[in-house]
Structure formats: structure tokens, C-alpha cells
Image (tube, coloured by chain):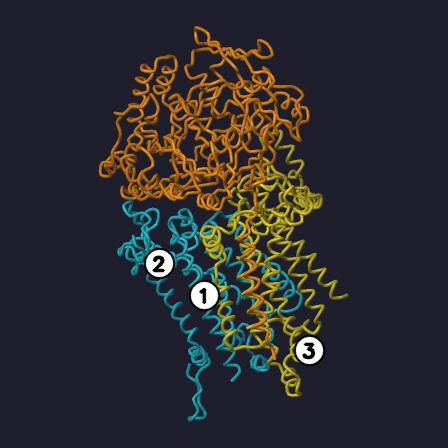
């Protein structure tokens, strides 16, 4: 409980820091402050004064901040400088798409990466282990954008198996409800659902694979390292000498003790994962928040950058802190220990 | 002991095989009567009155709207549109249009029309840009670049309603290109009823964002940087065979559009890259249409900035570049060398127009003479989008950079997002820019006037910011005459003046291409602007 | 490093030599090391090795394929790009910028990170916990996001991108240094120094830092591979190096324009980035296992 409060406290402090940072961003961006905040280019002096009153620019910085927090909570996130679209709507459309990609990639990496890591850690220095280590070394040395381009060249242009862009062929007119494409197809009443599912899954393969290969390689390394460390520990050797089989030892002692140290490392990898997902989104025209943010930068859409940055960093932060909390809660002994992994 | 590796390997193989099988099972789209066009950029709005960018015209001019008059895309003749017939008075000052009856506006979730098209819609659509006191004039910024550049609002005396289906337009002076201008992409007819409703609701700006027109397609959805959806207008007044659904997939990168054409994600693409044309022609499943384009790609100097206000400096810069190699490297030979503004397809073309050759030594001499120092730095703006008249401005800028380096001038290449690019150009922040012009109608006035007259500076189509009364007088004079030969002579005089003043260096008249999947039939290149889909058909495989 | 030998017959190699001996045992690590040295050489000597001026355009030789292809030419070993520039020379210069800027990024982050970390380690209590929280916050903001914000404020450019990546890399060095310093401060040899009257900065520089070097080097190799990935990714997204500069990621994204007719223009720069990262990772891994083995003995 005490731990929970500590982490809650940490979460609140971090969120506050991020909000403060994002509050000050428009002051740093080039150009007109009013436009940077509101997304509207004032056409006349009257409109300007009116807008300044709305955003409390005529009052103290403190009032402006309060107004900022209020509008964040009221989902009144302003409009894009570019096409005056509602930012709250844009983000709520784009963010689930990113979550989807992150989720699938993470799932694939965990399902494939962790078992392989375990096996090769247990059986280290045999041919299987050697090929796994080689794969993971190669895998996490891939620049993700190059990997994606190579996939496109092979699977889309040469073999013509898979599509390149988006989450589903635009001709399937799936109305957006949840923002998660598979759910949306299920809830829609379009005539050719099976085709739509198949098409959506086709679109998923390459982006997921591009992100997942790099992440899987990392997971394999961490898991393998961790299991090797654990299997060298005194209590394992003691158990061995007492005549337990390797299987018994592994499931009784090895598994949990090897998994626990991996979790915080995974938490650190989330930011890498998000970076990769953002790059992959731009390559595969995946309509997620990363592509949206990068377009916003090209189009100098400052209100969008501010909100997008806040949302993504809040998400990453929340994930990181939650994972850390879970790790600590599961293993109170680690509380004082600091991770200094070589 | 453990046999996990083996089990795992088997599992992996199995899943790989099933994945492959699954990947081969192509989802079928046959049941959907739809088509995807991959466009290159976001439209600025859904009203071509507000914008001369062909992206905006593509997305709206022939999808959502109709005009009083239309060009026949194959021969350029003016044909009836929403006006079923028209009459020009003897003195060439009064035009009377008889309008079609029973033309339905779009019914959409955001607007349900209660009446059909009539004279009020025509008057509203013209008055919006013509009359600066019109309540809608300033909605959307108050800039109507095409009309402003022609100074058309000053030429029209009145637009009057004779009865519900008859409109009379009176001019101050005769204008031999007036009818042609009414047939351009920009002269669209909006719904007056919708405008009034929006004004009453206090959101007039929606007129250009959620458009209502009479055209073959209704607007459904626009997502910035992603897609635009259209749906067929069931009550369109002409028979159409176009697909039920039309999607514009906004794909900025030319290489990605090409890739998506190959995978079949695009049925047709905007501006196929020059280097891919040969590949498209070779492949069975792709088709390439081509037509000599009515366009010109040029390098314009910002004559409002020193030292580019000096004709000799401009001439020196023109001498420093080798157009032949630009044509080879950028257009890969798919263009003809431009000597003046109009291409050979136009009747005003001057085959013997004077032109500066490549002479870097002379260029340096001129620069020295005019006091432009060695290592002088200037910027060249290269537009970020592909156009027929310049398929790769960035590449051209790099070539120009190396030519100018030879005469001791440093070049910074500048590029922005397309909409920002044009806004900054309009404000004149550039030293020089690589851009061009695509004809909106067959009249040479459509080149000479919007590109270089004084009136075209504030409207943002005069990229050289060049204002020369003598030139304006020539262009003006040419419009008063109806005789082609006499007009041609005047345009030749203008060419000579441009050769001496060199506000811009004409570079190329390029072929126009349209790449599409072979199962798409009846697609035509529209030499006068926006793309059209009303007669396109998808052949079942 | 010469050390006093009490027992003449026994050979005690210095820790660094020891690591080198361990490192040399792995052929793969050695191969990686050779590759890395090659990149270092390219970084230093690119202008001398390159057969052509990387900016030299030749409109008569546009999009030539590499020499081994049927239409290739032996003059342009790896072909030419859309402006007829020699791809081999451009790649050498691109490697130079990418690798060089990554090295600078890592060097700066190490200096700042270790300095801040030492400070945080020597100080303790509330201030330290504040630093810790702040670090955790910054560390979990994805690099790309930091880069986007910096680019939004300062504009695109290689220097700005380098700044962003440096900011993203510093926290891990602070974190490690701080942890290390705090652990060491509790040990007896530090207490001994302190009893001798040594000041905190002196203890850090003369007693703790030498023991930390290996740790930092290993961490720096990880940081180097991250820096290379990030700088080229940002270059690829057009947020880092801008046109006149030749950078691998940027070259790759320029090659995309003609990807279909000239696939080598995306394969080759990507391969360079990949090999660069791979060599750094292999060397890093080799160092780590060498270090681990040495500690084991």
C-alpha cells in the first residue's frame, strides 16, 4: 500500500511536470504565440483581442496555466493550424491505431522472444544458442526503417503478396467507432466482412513484423542473459547438487527469478519501441499518432505538436511507471537494489 | 531432458507456412464498385475559387462542382455545362446564359437542399469573388488568386438575373478570353441556399470545407494527410459511369505512389515519377496515357529583391545554366525545351523566339559588371510536389546549384510543405523559385496574364513579382482583338520584352502523363486542369 | 600501465590488457572490431579515399548501376545516383557524417552524464531523489519525440538533431555513474582516502573514476549504436541533416525517389548503417563478455 502511494505520487508528479513543459512549449516555438496556442491565425485586430481573452493571454501566466489545464480536462484541445481540425478528435482517431501496432508488436515479441531467450539461455553454447545469439545480434542492429523498406521491396513489389499502406484498403468503408480496426470491422455492418478482416490482417503483417523483429531480438538477449545469470546462482547449484532435474529446477527457481529482472528492462525499451513504431507508421502510412506528429512537424502545426507530444509522453510514462510498480510489488526485496546491469 | 528447441522450431515452421498461405489468400474487392486515386498532397480547401493549386482542382473542380461552361478535354472547345446555351452581344460586352433546369445539388448528412440549381447560385458564385462587399468575400481569406490575377472583377460591370434560369453578365470592355475563363476549373458554381444556411448558423467557413455542389461526386470525408472520400451523386444531371465510391489516397512520396500502383492499392496515381515511366509502359498490368501538355516549367527570380531587380543579373543567371542537361536529367527527355511561355500546342507559339544559350563565361562577366560579388549567396526554392511541368524540382535545384557554383554563386535550396511553400512565395520571401504553370484553358492569355502582370503579384501567381507597364499594355491589347494572327503578333512582342527583361527563365514544356492500372478504362487526361472520374470504369477481371 | 610486481615470476597483465586478451579470443568480436576500425578510418580519411567529389554531377551518367551489374561501369564502383554523382564517394562521406556525429554525441553525453552523475552520487538525500525522478521522466520520453520538439523550436538541422539525441542519451550515464559512485562511497578504500583528508572531487577523480572507466566504455558502445540509429532515422525522416550535407539516413530517403529503377540506392546506404551498428554492437558485446570473464577469473 505504501508502495502504491509512492508510485501514485511519482505518477502525479511526472504528469504535472509534463503538463508544465507542454504548457511552455508555445512560448518557445517560432511565430505568433496566439497562433501557436490556438491554431487560429487571427484575421483582424478584433478577432485577435477576442481570442486573447479566450486564452487568457491578457492575464497572468498563472491564469493561463489554469485555463490550459481546464481545457485539457474538457477535451478542448484546440485546432490544428493547418486545416482547423479538432485536435481532440484527431488524437482520439490516431492514438488507438498506434496502440494497436504497439500492442501487436509487443505481443509477438513476447510470445517469440521470451521462450527463445529461455531456451537458448538454458542450452547456451550449443548450435541453437549460437544461431539465436547471431539472429538477435543482427536483429537489433537493423535500422528499422531500412528493414521496413526491404520488406516492402520483397513482399509487396517483388512477390506482390502484401499491401504497403494503411490499416485496411480504403475501399472498405469501415466507420470509426473504437479506433481499433478489427473491433471496428466487427461492429460495422459492411457487406463483406470476411474480406475486410483478411485485408486488415494483411495490412498488419509487415508493420508488425518490422517493429517486432527489432524488439524480439532485444527480448531474446535480455531473457537469455537473465536466465544464464540465474542458472549460475548459488541456490540453483545447490538444488542441482541435491539431485533435482533441470526441468524441476527451472520451473521451481529459474523462471520467476529470471523473469523479474527482465521487466524493468522491458519498461525502458518502451520508449525505443514507440520511436520505432513512429518511424514505421510514416513508412507504411499507418494512420497513427507518430505519423500524425511527423506530418505536423513538416507542416509546422505547433498546436498539434504540443498536444501530440504531451499525449505520447504521458502514455510512455504511465506504462513505464506501471511496469516498475508491478515489478516492485512482486519482488519487494529488490526495493533497495539499483539496477546496474553490465 | 528438454526438447524444447525442436518443438519450438516445428511450431515456428508451422506458423511460417500458415502465414505464407494466409498471405497468398488475397481479399477480394470485386464486390465494391469503387476506385482509389493516389493524389500527391492535401487540397488547400474544397473550393477551387480560392486556390490555383492543381491539388485543390483535382480534389474538387470536376468531382464536386460543375461550371456554366466546360472544355471538351479532347479538342479544347467550349461546350455547355450548367448553361445549356449562351449568347454574346454584337459589341462583345453582354453575355446571356440560359441555365439548365432540374439540376440537383448534393444531399449530404450536413445539408439537404430544398430547391434545384437556378440563377441565384450563379450570381452568388460570381459575386463571391467579384464583389469585395459580398458577405462571403472575406470568408476563407478573401483571396481569389485566379480571378485576381486576371483582374476579372474589374472587368465585369454587372451580373444580373433576368429570370430564374437566365443570367446576363455585362463587361466594361470586350474580353476575347471571357468565355474560356468561365470554363476553367476555378469558375465553379456553389449553392447559394447552402451558403445562406451556413451564414445563419454562424459557420460560413464550412462552405469551403464541407462543400456542396452539383457535380458527379458528393463529398463525404477528408482526413488531412490521409484520404478524401467521395460518393457518387445519384441525381447527377448527366449520365455517368463512374465508380460508386471514389477515394483519394493522399500519398506524398512519388516512389510510394508507384509502389502502391504496382500492389494495386492505387488504381491511378497523380504524377508518376519520370524515371518510372519506362517501367509502367513495360508492365502488362499498368497503363500509361500521355498527351503533350499545355504547360511551362520555369525558374522565376524575385524581381522585387536586389540584385534580382536588375535585368542584367537575371540574364547572367539564365546564361549560367544549361537547359539541355536540365531537360535530360529532370524530364529524362520527356519534354520540349521552352523558349517563351506558351508551348507549341498553342496557336500563339513562336518557333523563332529568341533564347539565351549556355555561356558561363559571359554570365560571370555580366555578374562582375553588375557588381555581384564572387561567392554571392542566393536561395532557390524548389517546390516539394511533383508537377507535369516540373517532375522533380529538388533535383533541378541541385543541378542549378552546381551550375551556379561554376560562376561563383552559392545556392541554398529551400523547400517547405506545399501549402506553406505557396503562402511564403506569395509573401515574396524567395530569391528565386522553380515552379511552373499548367494551362486552365486553351487561350494564351492564360499564360501571359496570370504569370507576369502587375495584378497577379498580390494574388500570388506572379512568382517573379515582376511589374512592367509596357508588358501589361501588350497583354491588355491582345484581349481586345478577336483575330488570332493579330493577337499572335502582340504576344511575340511580349516574348521579345520577356527575353530582354528575363523575369523568369522558361525551361520546359513537358508531356502530361497519367499512370493507371490496366483494368481501369475510359480515363482521359484533362489538359485544362483537374482530373475527372465521371466516365471511368473498372473492368472486371 | 606499469605496476609494481612483488612476485617476479608471475605475470599480471593490467586490467585493460587483460580485457584485450579476453576480447581477442572471440573471432566474431575481432571481426567486428576490424569493421569498426574501418569505419573510423573512413570517418577520418573519407576525402582522401573517395575517388570522386561527392557533389560532382554528371548528367551523362545518371543512375548507373553498380559495377557488377551488366550495365555497370568500372569507373563508378557502386554506380551513380539521379544526378550522376558517384555513389561510392557519397557513401564514404555519408558514413563520415553519420559516424562522426554519433561519436561526438556520445563523447558529449559521457562528459556531461558522468559529471552530473558524480555530482548526484556525492550529494544525497532529497536533492538526489529529485534528480532521480527527473531522470526517469526524461529517460522514458522517446528520442524521436525529444527530436521533434527540438526541431519544432530550433528548426531542422544536423546540430539540432545531435542536441536532441545527446539530451536523450545523457540520463543513462547520469544514472549509472550515480549508482556506481554511491556504491563505491560506502567502501573502505574511500573511507581510507577520506581519513587521509581527500576532498570529494579528489576522491571521485583519483579513486572512483579509474574503476568506472570500463563500465563507461561499455555503456558508451551501447550509446554509440543508439546514436547511429537515431541520427540516421532522423536523417531518414528529414529532421536531421539537410540536403547539402551527405548523411546515410538522408541518402537513403533520397534514394527512395528512384527506388523502383535503382534499388541499390536504398540497399547500399541501409547496408552501411546496418554494418556500422552491427560492428559497434559486436564490439560492445565482446567487451562485455571480456569484462565478465575477467571478473570471473
Q: Nearer the viewer, residue C49 or A68?
A: C49
Residue C220 lies, with reference to residue B120, above or below; the image says below
| Quadrant position of the C terminus of chain A in the picture | bottom right
Q: Nearer the viewer, residue A86 or B259?
A: B259
* Residue drawn at 41 percent across, 14 percent down: B176
* Residue drawn at 43 percent across, 73 percent down: C28
Q: How many marks?
A: 3
Residue C181 coordinates in the image, percent (x, y) = 57, 73
Which residue is tagged 2? C92
Crowdedness near tag 2: few (<14), some (14–19) or many (≥20) residues, C-alpha within 10 Å:
many
Residue B211 coordinates in the image, percent (x, y) = 59, 29
Are circles 2 and 3 on residues that touch, CB within 8 Å? no
Residue C26 coordinates in the image, percent (x, y) = 44, 77
Crowdedness near tag 1: few (<14), some (14–19) or many (≥20) residues, C-alpha within 10 Å:
many
The circle drawn on residue A252 is 3
Disc 2 versus disc 3: nearer the observer: 3
The circle drawn on residue C278 is 1
What subunit carries mark 3?
A: A
Residues marked 1 and 3, same chain: no
Which chain is the one coloured orange? B
Residue A218 coordinates in the image, percent (x, y) = 55, 65
| Quadrant position of the N terminus of chain A in the picture | bottom right
Q: Is residue C118 visible?
A: no
Residues marked 1 and 2, same chain: yes
Amino acid at each position: 500500500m505504501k508502495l502504491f502511494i509512492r508510485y501514485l505520487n511519482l505518477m502525479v508528479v511526472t504528469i504535472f511536470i509534463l503538463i508544465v513543459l507542454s504548457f511552455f512549449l508555445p512560448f518557445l516555438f517560432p511565430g505568433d504565440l496566439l497562433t501557436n496556442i490556438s491554431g487560429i491565425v487571427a484575421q483582424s485586430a478584433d478577432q485577435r483581442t477576442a481570442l486573447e481573452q479566450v486564452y487568457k493571454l491578457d492575464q497572468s501566466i498563472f491564469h493561463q496555466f489554469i485555463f490550459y489545464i481546464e481545457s485539457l480536462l474538457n477535451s478542448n484541445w484546440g485546432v490544428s493550424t493547418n486545416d482547423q481540425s479538432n485536435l481532440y478528435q484527431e488524437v482520439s482517431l490516431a492514438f488507438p491505431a498506434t496502440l494497436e501496432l504497439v500492442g501487436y508488436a509487443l505481443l509477438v515479441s513476447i510470445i517469440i522472444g521470451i521462450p527463445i531467450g529461455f531456451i537458448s539461455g538454458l542450452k547456451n553454447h550449443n548450435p541453437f544458442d549460437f544461431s539465436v545469439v547471431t539472429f538477435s545480434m543482427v536483429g537489433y542492429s537493423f535500422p528499422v526503417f531500412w528493414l521496413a523498406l526491404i520488406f516492402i521491396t520483397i513482399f509487396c513489389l517483388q512477390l506482390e503478396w502484401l499491401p504497403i499502406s494503411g490499416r485496411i484498403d480504403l475501399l472498405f468503408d469501415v466507420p470509426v467507432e473504437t479506433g481499433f480496426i478489427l473491433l471496428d470491422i466487427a461492429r460495422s455492418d459492411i457487406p463483406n466482412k470476411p474480406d475486410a478482416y483478411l485485408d486488415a490482417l494483411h495490412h498488419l503483417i509487415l508493420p508488425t513484423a518490422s517493429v517486432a523483429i527489432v524488439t524480439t531480438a532485444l527480448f531474446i538477449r535480455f531473457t537469455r542473459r537473465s536466465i544464464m545469470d540465474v542458472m549460475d546462482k548459488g541456490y540453483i547449484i545447490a538444488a542441482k547438487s541435491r539431485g533435482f532435474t533441470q526441468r524441476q529446477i527451472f520451473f521451481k527457481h529459474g523462471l520467476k527469478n529470471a523473469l523479474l529482472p527482465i521487466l524493468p528492462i522491458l519498461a525502458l525499451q518502451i520508449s525505443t519501441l514507440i520511436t520505432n513504431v513512429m518511424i514505421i507508421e510514416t513508412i507504411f502510412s499507418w494512420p497513427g499518432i507518430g505519423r500524425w506528429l511527423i506530418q505536423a512537424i513538416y507542416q509546422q502545426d505547433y498546436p498539434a505538436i504540443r498536444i501530440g507530444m504531451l499525449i505520447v509522453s504521458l502514455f510512455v510514462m504511465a506504462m513505464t511507471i506501471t511496469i516498475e510498480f508491478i515489478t516492485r510489488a512482486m519482488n519487494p526485496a529488490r526495493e533497495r537494489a539499483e539496477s546496474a546491469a553490465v | 531432458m528438454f526438447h524444447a528447441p525442436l518443438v519450438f522450431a516445428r511450431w515456428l515452421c508451422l506458423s511460417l507456412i500458415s502465414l505464407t498461405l494466409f498471405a497468398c489468400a488475397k481479399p477480394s474487392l470485386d464486390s465494391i464498385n469503387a476506385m482509389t486515386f493516389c493524389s500527391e498532397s492535401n487540397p488547400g480547401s474544397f473550393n477551387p475559387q480560392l486556390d490555383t493549386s492543381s491539388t485543390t482542382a483535382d480534389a474538387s473542380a470536376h468531382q464536386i462542382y460543375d461550371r456554366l461552361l466546360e472544355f471538351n478535354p479532347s479538342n479544347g472547345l467550349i461546350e455547355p455545362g450548367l448553361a445549356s446555351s449562351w449568347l454574346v452581344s454584337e459589341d462583345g460586352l453582354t453575355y446571356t446564359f440560359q441555365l439548365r433546369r432540374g439540376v440537383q445539388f448534393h444531399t449530404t448528412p450536413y445539408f439537404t437542399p430544398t430547391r434545384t440549381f437556378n440563377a441565384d447560385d450563379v450570381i452568388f458564385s460570381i459575386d463571391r469573388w467579384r464583389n469585395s462587399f459580398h458577405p462571403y468575400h472575406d470568408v476563407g481569406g478573401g483571396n481569389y488568386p485566379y480571378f485576381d490575377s486576371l483582374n476579372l472583377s474589374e472587368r465585369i460591370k454587372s451580373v444580373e438575373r433576368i429570370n430564374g434560369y437566365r443570367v446576363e453578365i455585362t463587361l466594361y470592355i470586350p474580353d476575347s478570353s471571357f468565355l474560356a475563363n468561365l470554363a476553367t476549373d476555378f469558375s465553379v458554381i456553389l449553392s447559394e441556399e447552402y451558403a445562406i444556411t451556413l451564414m445563419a448558423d454562424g459557420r460560413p467557413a464550412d462552405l469551403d470545407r464541407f462543400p456542396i455542389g452539383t457535380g458527379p461526386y458528393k463529398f463525404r470525408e477528408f482526413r488531412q494527410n490521409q484520404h478524401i472520400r467521395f460518393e457518387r451523386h445519384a441525381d447527377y444531371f448527366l449520365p455517368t459511369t463512374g465508380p460508386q465510391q471514389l477515394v483519394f489516397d493522399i500519398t506524398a512520396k512519388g516512389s510510394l505512389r508507384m509502389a502502391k500502383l504496382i500492389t494495386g492499392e492505387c488504381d491511378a496515381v497523380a504524377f508518376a515519377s519520370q524515371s518510372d515511366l519506362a517501367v509502367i509502359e513495360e508492365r502488362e498490368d499498368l497503363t500509361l496515357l500521355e498527351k503533350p501538355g499545355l504547360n511551362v516549367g520555369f525558374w522565376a527570380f524575385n524581381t522585387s529583391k536586389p540584385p534580382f531587380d536588375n535585368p542584367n543579373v537575371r540574364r547572367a543567371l539564365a546564361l549560367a545554366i544549361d537547359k539541355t542537361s536540365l531537360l535530360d536529367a529532370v524530364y529524362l527527355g520527356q519534354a520540349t525545351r521552352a523558349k517563351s511561355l506558351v508551348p507549341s500546342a498553342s496557336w500563339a507559339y513562336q518557333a523563332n523566339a529568341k533564347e539565351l544559350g549556355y555561356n558561363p563565361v559571359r554570365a560571370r562577366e555580366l555578374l562582375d559588371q553588375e557588381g555581384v560579388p564572387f561567392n554571392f549567396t542566393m536561395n532557390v526554392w524548389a517546390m516539394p510536389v511533383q508537377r507535369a511541368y516540373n517532375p522533380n524540382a529538388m533535383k533541378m535545384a541541385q543541378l542549378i546549384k552546381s551550375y551556379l557554383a561554376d560562376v561563383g554563386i552559392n545556392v541554398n535550396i529551400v523547400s517547405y510543405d506545399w501549402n506553406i511553400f505557396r503562402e511564403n512565395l506569395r509573401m515574396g520571401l524567395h530569391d528565386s523559385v522553380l515552379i511552373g504553370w499548367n494551362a486552365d484553358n486553351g487561350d494564351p492569355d492564360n499564360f501571359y496574364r496570370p504569370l507576369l502582370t502587375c495584378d497577379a503579384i498580390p494574388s500570388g501567381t506572379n512568382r517573379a513579382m515582376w511589374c512592367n507597364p509596357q508588358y501589361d499594355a501588350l497583354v491588355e491589347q491582345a484581349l481586345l482583338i478577336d483575330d488570332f494572327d493579330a493577337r499572335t503578333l502582340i504576344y511575340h512582342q511580349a516574348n521579345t520584352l520577356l527575353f530582354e527583361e528575363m523575369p523568369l527563365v522558361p525551361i520546359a514544356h513537358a508531356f502530361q502523363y497519367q499512370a493507371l492500372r490496366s483494368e481501369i478504362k475510359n480515363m482521359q487526361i484533362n489538359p485544362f486542369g483537374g482530373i475527372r472520374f465521371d466516365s471511368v470504369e473498372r473492368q472486371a477481371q | 600501465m606499469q605496476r609494481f610486481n612483488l612476485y617476479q615470476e608471475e605475470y599480471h597483465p593490467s586490467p585493460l590488457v587483460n580485457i584485450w586478451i579476453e576480447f581477442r579470443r572471440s573471432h566474431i568480436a575481432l571481426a567486428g572490431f576490424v569493421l569498426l576500425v574501418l569505419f573510423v578510418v573512413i570517418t577520418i580519411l573519407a576525402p582522401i579515399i573517395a575517388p570522386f567529389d561527392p557533389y560532382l554531377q554528371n548528367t551523362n551518367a545518371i543512375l548507373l548501376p553498380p559495377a557488377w551489374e551488366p550495365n555497370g561501369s568500372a569507373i563508378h564502383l557502386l554506380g551513380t545516383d539521379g544526378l550522376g554523382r558517384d555513389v561510392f564517394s557519397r557513401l564514404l562521406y555519408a558514413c563520415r557524417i553519420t559516424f562522426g556525429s554519433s561519436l561526438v554525441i556520445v563523447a558529449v553525453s559521457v562528459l556531461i552524464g558522468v559529471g552530473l552523475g558524480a555530482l548526484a552520487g556525492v550529494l544525497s538525500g532529497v536533492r538526489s531523489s529529485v534528480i532521480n525522478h527527473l531522470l526517469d521522466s526524461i529517460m522514458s520520453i522517446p528520442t524521436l519525440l525529444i527530436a521533434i520538439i527540438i526541431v519544432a523550436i530550433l528548426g531542422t538541422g544536423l546540430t539540432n538533431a545531435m542536441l536532441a539525441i545527446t539530451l536523450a542519451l545523457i540520463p543513462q550515464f547520469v544514472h549509472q555513474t550515480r549508482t556506481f559512485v554511491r556504491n563505491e562511497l560506502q567502501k573502505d578504500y574511500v573511507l581510507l582516502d577520506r581519513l587521509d583528508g581527500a576532498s570529494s572531487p579528489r576522491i571521485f577523480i583519483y579513486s572512483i573514476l579509474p574503476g568506472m572507466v570500463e563500465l563507461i566504455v561499455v555503456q558508451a558502445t551501447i550509446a554509440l549504436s543508439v546514436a547511429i540509429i537515431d541520427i540516421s532515422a532522423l536523417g531518414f525522416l528529414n529532421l536531421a541533416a539537410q540536403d547539402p550535407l551527405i548523411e546515410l539516413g538522408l541518402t537513403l530517403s533520397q534514394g527512395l525517389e528512384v527506388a523502383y529503377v535503382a534499388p541499390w540506392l536504398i540497399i547500399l546506404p541501409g547496408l552501411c548503417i546496418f554494418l556500422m551498428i552491427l560492428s559497434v554492437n559486436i564490439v560492445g558485446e565482446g567487451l562485455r563478455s571480456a569484462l565478465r570473464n575477467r571478473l570471473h577469473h
